[in-house]
Amino acid sequence: MELHVVMAANDGYTPYMGTCILSLLENNVKQFEAICIYIIDNGISKENQKKLTEQCSIFQNTNIAFFNLEKRFSALHPIVENGWNITIYGRFFLDDIVDKSVDKVLYLDSDTIVNASLKELLLLDLTEYCLAGVVDISDDKSREFLNMDPSSHYINSGVLLVNMNKWREMHITEKLINFVNTFPQRLPCPDQDAINAVCGNMIFLLPVKYNYGWFLSQRRLKWDYYKADFYYSYDELYDTVKDSFANVVVFHFFGPYKPWRKGECFKQFEDVFLKYYKKSPWFQKIKFASRKKCIHYYVIQKPAQLLAQFIRHLLGERGYDRLCGLFEKKGDSV
């Protein structure tokens, strides 16, 4: 079995994409006969292309190729501009990149880390589906905004397993372009919104372990107390993160808080990124974004983290969650 992975980045994001690729290869090179990596190149320097190529050459049966989709991107001209970097639309053009013989493609955002084998994921039967993904935390609100079928769910587009046969058969690329170009309002997450609106009920829902974002660590504290209407139960979220996130396959650092800036992510998430970043050719010591953030980290954030670790050790993970949930519930009632 071969693994075909598509990623996209500009030059500034290349170190983080390269770190993700390193994590992918370390945990999967022995699981597949070959790993083919396709990079949508939005201005990656020759130096960074060389580093990416040399990094992949260390691993057997691994290939990497770069694609410039500037002409394809020119087909996108939304009625309402959204301000996002054009690179986000790279996942629209999978059929322009991979060979027609490829039936499954994994798309990964550059701010992800692959922490385990992907073989189980690739063995999924997607015959009746266009793609597979993990339900996003904005599920209800986004479905309503896009006027989606109430029976469907809104997924996060950072990790997508795509059935290329269905993708081609349904002319998904053309439909995505048309959706973005004709939607009359500003799309908060244009690529993600388009994929959900177009694919709708043709999406297979994956376990949360395949796209675990740090927001879920924060939000899961509420599940047990408010019985929030969310696709994943508290128990599934808990089982995914127990034993120091041992069951998470793909970490996703979505949102504004990134592990390559000191003190922005939970320490455990920061450590997951650093485990691979330190071994990459782009490694440099992570720093605070500003002096203000540095002071906040050492005066408030770090002492609070140490206290939380102590309480978690005394009460256990579930007990700690229950305590946090009680405080949140009390705060919401004020």
Image (tube, rainbow, N blue to C red):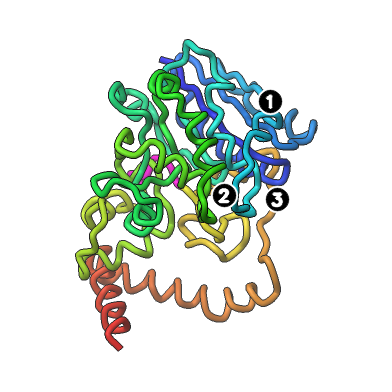
Picture residue at 50% right of the left edge, 42% below the top: 113
State the residue position of label 2: 274
On screen, residue 266 above or below 14: below
The residue type indicated by label 2 comes to Leu
Residue located at (38% from left, 45% from top): 155
Q: Is residue 232 left or right of residue 138?
A: left
Residue 229 screen position, x and y as percent: 23, 59
Q: Residues within 10 Å of mark 2 (few under 14, many from 20)?
A: some
Which region shows up in magenta? 246-251
Horizontal side, residue 292 vs residue 321: left or right: right
Q: Amino acid at mark 3?
A: Gln
Tell me if label 1 and label 3 are in contact, CB under 8 Å.
no
Q: How many marks?
A: 3
Q: Which residue is the site of mark 3?
A: 284
Residue 110 drawn in magenta: no
Which picture quadrant has residue 319? bottom left
Please, which residue is most extreme toward the bottom here? 334
Dominant SS in magenta: loop
Choose between 118 and 215: the one closer to the eye.
Answer: 215
Residue 53, label in figure: 1
Q: Reading the chain from its start, which is encountered first: label 1 or label 3?
A: 1
Q: Residue furthest right?
A: 46
